[in-house]
Amino acid sequence: MDLLQYLAQALTPFNLLLAFGGVLLGTLIGALPGLSATMAVAVLVPFTFAMPPASGLIALGAIYTGAIYGGAFAAILVNTPGTPSAIATTFDGFPMAKRGDGNLAVTLATLASVVGGIVGALALLFLSPPLSKVALAFGPPEYFWLAIFGLTLISALSQGDTLKGILGASFGLFLATVGVAVVGGDVRYTLDQPMLVGGFDVIAALIGLYCIPVVIDLVARPDPHLKVSVQAGGYRLAEALRLCVANWFNLVRSSVIGTVVGILPGAGGSIASLVSYSEARRSSRHPERFGKGEPGGILATESANNATVGGGFIPTLVLGIPGTPPDAVILGALLVQGIRTGPGLFTGQGDIVFTFIFGLLIATILMLPTGLFVGRYAYQAIVSIPKAVLVPTVAFLTIIGSFAIHNSITDVYTMLGLGLIGWILARYGFQPSPIVLGVILGPIAEQGFVQAWLIGNAQGNVLGMFFGRPISLAIAALAALTLFYPVLMDTLKARRARRADGAKKEPIDAD
Amino acid sequence: MRTEPTTPGARSRGDLGTIVLCVLFVALGIWMLAGSMAMSPLGAVFPRVIAGVMIASALAILALRALGRASPPAAVETGSTPRRLLLCLALVAWAGLMPRLGFFTTSIVGFLAVLAIAEYDRWTPKRTAAYVAAALAMVGGFYLLFVEVLLVPVPRGVLF
């Protein structure tokens, strides 16, 4: 009964307007490369201070979920993830757009984001206290193995040349070591340049590595940027719904992965989407189609990254530990509003928390019409803009977007430098995704590895620290399975083919 | 964007490029190892592992090439190389001049320069006017969004 009362409070016209406006604004900000969900939330936090606490939280939650979803637009239409959470969306989204299925890809991303967002919000509503214990069960070795699990995607992303993928990832990991070490404080590989002490910014690196090679190659040919689908226009909603139904298990599994990864402090949407993509590919009947425009890839990544929104709020609200960077900003806003997070929050200030959760749920549902509407026009705009105007527009967005990260020209130089290196590497078969994977997962892997090693050393049991904990073992087993699954399957197929050949030859020999 | 290599020359260029890059990666790995000697054990352990992986995988690629068992070289892009190089120069100049000349001025000039590089059709007065209007609208719109709404302090330089 109480829950219905909170639902009614979330459905007031003012809260609905905030949810709708927040989703729309978040989607537009998320779609611009360089403007992350964290920045969207941080910029708009002060506006919520004048609102009632629940309404302010609904606005922030809606902006957050909208921004995470909005990252998919740039990822699909111009191969540049609008936010780091949308990195994996580029793998299949852009190939779909290039072959003329951009509108279908955007609709799939919208549906997947809504499903993922709803699963995350429902977990927040019903399972917050027990799920928050998961966050406490994750220690340094689990984070290390989680990062390694993410890195196993290299085998999928290196398009047939795993060695080049590993080399690219090690280059990305090297970039991640530049600057002050995450543990120990050593200043590494800075060439005595002050601008390198802070290291390479992840967002500047991914804008450069993904976007600059695309822009450079766009000017080399007169043909259009994206094909226009001749057989189907509009939203292609029915087709997308059919694909969602066919991939329902992938959607649910990715949403659950997103929720659980969102609960882990510091992990965030990028890891959730990479891990769920890896799982979707591993368990698919056609893993070879991933990276070439497989709808299942978009469904996995987009449902997972939006599920981290609800998942991330679980440790934020129950333990006071932010699950994702935007949660840290929202946690600050909660404190300003006089809300004390912790286990007593759900009973002591249940009216605010439950109204907010219902508001988040409503905002997620509103993402469907908003996203379809924005998506349709975004696709039409990208397709109809002459390439001569699109190229400088994208170039301008990469420059202003990377500048806006820290209001620093250094990030523009980083973006451009890494973009040019990425373009040269791509010409010789080194894909950008393994490099980006290394840049993102490097600090998490290093911190987990060194901390686990230190704790194991102090306990006199380093091996036990890495291989003796059940969650670690499970993640390590999944990582090994993902890495060796393609090789295993190829071996099994070759063996079956040999047996079949042998069976065919036997009757001939008998004759 | 990838296309099939058109000539055997493109294929050998792809091979040579891969070899040069692998040698550079080996050199980078050695430099990383040398640099890690001055670090604390905690700070050095991860770079050393990465350097080891980098050197090993680069040498493995070179060895496979030497044994003739390498995967086919990546297809070299076709299309206009001068335009690609001009675009690289334009982007570097855009970023380099921004702090000196100012964000808005550099962006307008950079936008039009990149637009000129990307344009393949004949320039007519109507088209030119439309493109200049597009540059002003795009740069002006985002300038206002970032500077006035998001309060991003863009470089002013000697102009604006």
Image (cartoon, coloured by chain):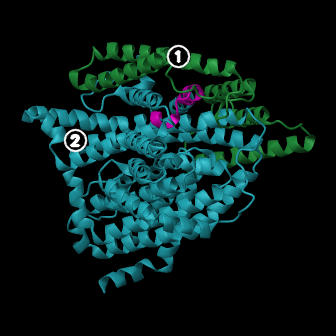
Who's green, chain-wise?
B
Q: Amino acid at mark 2?
A: Pro
Q: Is residue A430 magenta?
A: yes
Furthest residue in direction bottom, as rendered? A1
Q: Which residues are magenta?
A: A418-435
Residue A228 on image: x %, y %? 73, 54
- Image x and y of residue A407, in percent: 51, 38
User: With respect to residue A23, does B35 lie above or below?
Assistant: above
Q: Residue at x 37, y 13 (%)?
A: B30
Q: Residues within 10 Å of mark 2 (few under 14, many from 20)?
A: many
Q: Is residue A261 left or right of residue A108?
A: left
Q: Is residue B160 visible?
A: no
The label on residue A440 is none
* Nearest to the observer: residue A329 or residue B88: B88
For this orientation, the residue located farthest to the front is: A511
Element class at badge 2 = helix
Using the rendered image, report if marks 1 and 2 lie on a common chain.
Answer: no
Contact between labelled residues 2 and 1, with CB atoms less than 8 Å apart: no
Asked which quadrant contains residue B104, the reply is: top right
Circle 2 sits on which residue? Answer: A141
Nearer to the camera, A115 or A230: A230
Amino acid identity at mark 1:
Ile
Q: Which chain is cyan?
A: A
Q: Which residue is mark 1?
A: B19
Above or below residue B159? Residue A509 is below
Location of residue A189 in the rendering, given as x and y in whole percent from the top left corner: 38, 20
Dividing the image into 4 quarters, which one contains the N terminus of chain A?
Answer: bottom left
